[in-house]
Amino acid sequence: MIGAGRENAVQYDAIIVGGSFAGLSAALYLGRARRSVCVLDTRMPRNRFADASHGQFAQDGNDPQAMLATMRAQVAAYPTVHFVETQAVDAARDREAFAVALANSNVVRGTAILLAFGIIDILPDLPGLAERWGRSVIHCPYCHGYEFSDRRLGVLNLSPMSVHQAMLIPQWGPTTFFLNGGTIDPETTAQLERRGVAIEPALVRGLVGEGVHLSAIQLAGGREQPLDALYIGPPYRFSSDLAERLGCAIEDGMLGPTLTVDEMKATDIGGVYAAGDITRTGHTVSFACADGVMAALAIHRLLIFGAPT
């Protein structure tokens, strides 16, 4: 049992594992409901590599780190919300509550847990790619595509989802689909050609450009093709194993796992809720914030009315 004999472990109404957009949105609503909340935050959000976030009203184009700093400050103004900057390393039900073990050797207890720890992208091992991730190597056209409108765009073939991405991107500019040594069937080739997508079959060797900017993609044989932005759909993994430790149901998706939740963001484990990127295949700040609000409402109702029968 976690924290056996630790009778001085702090007890909260809710423990939120993750202090990014989903977790902070939930903390805000629970704080306004005058509930005691512990937010465990490692300050390593998924979008920390991006200089700007788009698609959120009143925040369009703002630095996501500045957005989170403002959110933390506003949430911290509520006296029942407590922040702990450390990692949760284990969690289990402890009598009528949950115990969460922390990397600093402390234990916190809560009636409910919200998992909002996010995901980690697994980037392909290509020279020049990692340092441009979130700047000129991007994933979501709705988040970053407008800024590269009518520029030279590419899509890197990483998975079956890459074809869908290649079909989508021409909306923003002339697009090349880099097969990277892979193959596609004639029907798919025809569909891409109807969308005006050029197809490059050669292996990709790396990316070049000044600083975080992209100017060309290097191909096998020493060729370089001019390029301003490269879209990739990398696989991902959970940034924490707490869902597995708690026994929550997890589904395998095309790019990575998804934690199973109902419409109120409840997992199949009573008292455990989840929000944000770990619960969906569509990943945006707006979705994450909405998920956090829904989870907070569900947790507040649990605290008042108990578990539904």
Image (cartoon, rainbow, N blue to C red):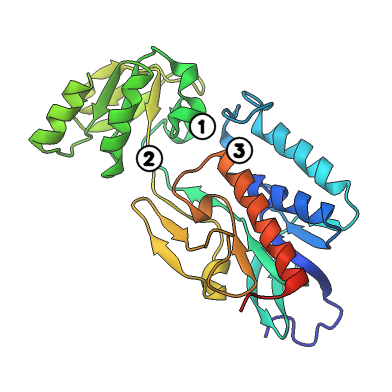
Name which of mark 2 and mark 3 comes first in the sequence.
3
Give the class, few, some or many, for how many residues have Cα within 10 Å of label 3's Cα (few <14, many ≥20): few
Q: Which quadrant would the N terminus be assigned to in this image?
A: bottom right
In the image: residue 174, left or right of residue 293: left
Do we see residue 2 in this rendering? yes
The residue shown at (26%, 44%) is 160
Name which of mark 3 and mark 1 comes first in the sequence.
3
The x and y percentages for residue 175 are 29, 20
In the image: residue 291, left or right of residue 13: left
**Residue furthest to the right:** 79
Mark-to-mark CA distance, 2 and 3: 17 Å
Looking at the picture, which amino acid does disc 2 mark? Gly
Q: Which mark is residue 48?
A: 3
Residue identifier under label 1: 134
The residue shown at (68%, 35%) is 65
Q: Nearer the viewer, residue 271 or 121?
A: 271
Kindly state the secondary structure of the residue where label 2 is placed: loop
The x and y percentages for residue 181 are 18, 37
Give the class, few, some or many, for how many residues have Cα within 10 Å of label 2's Cα (few <14, many ≥20): many
Do we see residue 105 in this rendering? no
**Residue furthest to the left:** 186
Q: Residue 104 occupies which quadrant of the picture?
A: bottom right
Residue identifier under label 2: 233
Q: Mark 3 and mark 1 in contact? Answer it, CB < 8 Å.
A: no
Say if 187 sits above or below 110 in the image.
above
The nearer-to-camera label among 1 and 2 is 2
Q: How many marks?
A: 3
The residue shown at (83%, 61%) is 35
The x and y percentages for residue 246 are 57, 74
